Image (tube, rainbow, N blue to C red):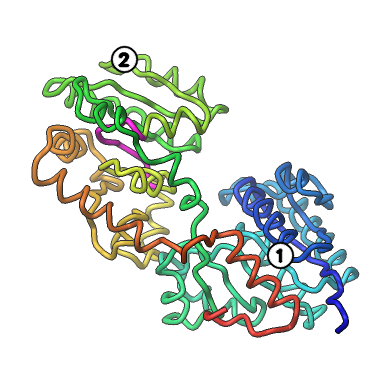
Amino acid sequence: MTAARPRTIWLVAGEDSGDQLGAKLMRALRAAAPGATFAGVGGEAMAEEGLTSLFPLDDVAVMGYLPVLARARTLLRRIRQTVDAAVRARPDVLVIIDSPGFTHAVARRVRKAAPGIPIVDYVSPSVWAWRPWRAKGMRPFIDHVMALLPFEPDAHRRLGGPPCTYVGHPLIERFPDLRPCGSEVLRREAVPYSLVVLPGSRRAEIDRLMPVFGRTLEQISRVVEVEVMLPAVTRHRALIERLALDWPVPVRILTGEGPKYAAFRGARAALAASGTVTLELALAGVPMVVAYKVSRAEELVARRLIQVSTIVLPNLILGENAVPEFVQAACAPASLAQALLPLLAGGAMRDAQLAALARIDDRMRLPEADTPSRAAARIVLRAAEGLDTGPAA
């Protein structure tokens, strides 16, 4: 029997989080298909796995309407460069990773120029939350979507999107880092209570939420003694330190993933900006209150486009609003303090949220001994071999 030839796999990421996913996927693909070769666009993590990127990832790692407009010429040039190189290479499969503004533009053009190249999308756009028509619009140029969240395959079926399989969120590989040990469980019960405050990872989020969070802590500190832990993105640490100067309680600012997860393991409760961090807190079993604010212009756009009743990931996974959220005008110190105090003090509200968060594990769990990167690699290799990659793959 003739051995299968080595596969050529193209991967195209558009920002740092996609680079991390791409690196893990490359490791899993190499283990499952020795001899596979890789090319495309990535960052430092994918470079460590052997990918030589067509250009620096920073050229396309742009978010927000104004930054995209300012870099439009560079983005268009990099899109054309990526498409031309992929079409010339004719890989066995093209894997686009998140960043749909960039990667979908690449995928559409590759499909038009070389319709025989299978295209797999790693990370579903949030079609379940806003602009749901994007799901159906993906069908002509995406053969399969690999979803990080367990409710996304149903969303794509409902909205007429491409075949979609839940492959697992990378965070489920971090369970050991998120689960408290005996002494950390005891720390959660000790006064002063450890309160984790997370104002976001982007400057605009930090600017809007830090003053609100400071006034919230002022109200909380009149009732209960807390020790505030604030994990910060390194590049914004100076800004956070400046904005926390007038807070009424001492703040311990942490940088790095290890200290952040250590803070989660000992935390009694959390006050957090909406985002992936709410899922990290949920998996760590930390009851939380979630807040978010955007500009008035962004609010007007969001009201027209957002299709869901909650923006909190644990709520979406559970199918119920177990975690209280306060958005825009509702994101006010009095409201946040009123919701947070029962989570610190204990009682029925705290117990109910803890019970809900405990159910998330089963919703996100993969079969025994499987991992997200291995599940994703199986689908990519089936696509490369020209096999069906339907949801049962």
Q: How many marks?
A: 2
Q: Amino acid at mark 1?
A: Ala
Identify the residue shown where x is 38% and y is 53%. Answer: 299
Q: Secondary structure at mark 1?
A: helix
Give the label on residue 250, or none: 2
Q: Residue 269: within the magenta?
A: yes
Residue placed most toward the observer, 329 or 241: 241
In the image, residue 79 lies at what x, y percent? 77, 60
In the image, residue 332 lies at what x, y percent? 23, 38
Kindly indicate the quadrant of the structure image that contains residue 192.
top left
Determine crowd level at label 1: few under 14, some 14-19, many 20+ residues with C-alpha closer than 10 A: some
Query: Start and end of the magenta stretch?
Result: 265-274
Residue to which mark 1 is pinned: 32
Kindly indicate the quadrant of the structure image that contains residue 252.
top left
Identify the residue shown where x is 90% and y is 70%. Answer: 88
Q: Which quadrant is the C terminus positioned in?
A: bottom right
Height in image: 354 above or below 31?
Answer: above
C-alpha distance separating marks 1 and 2: 50 Å
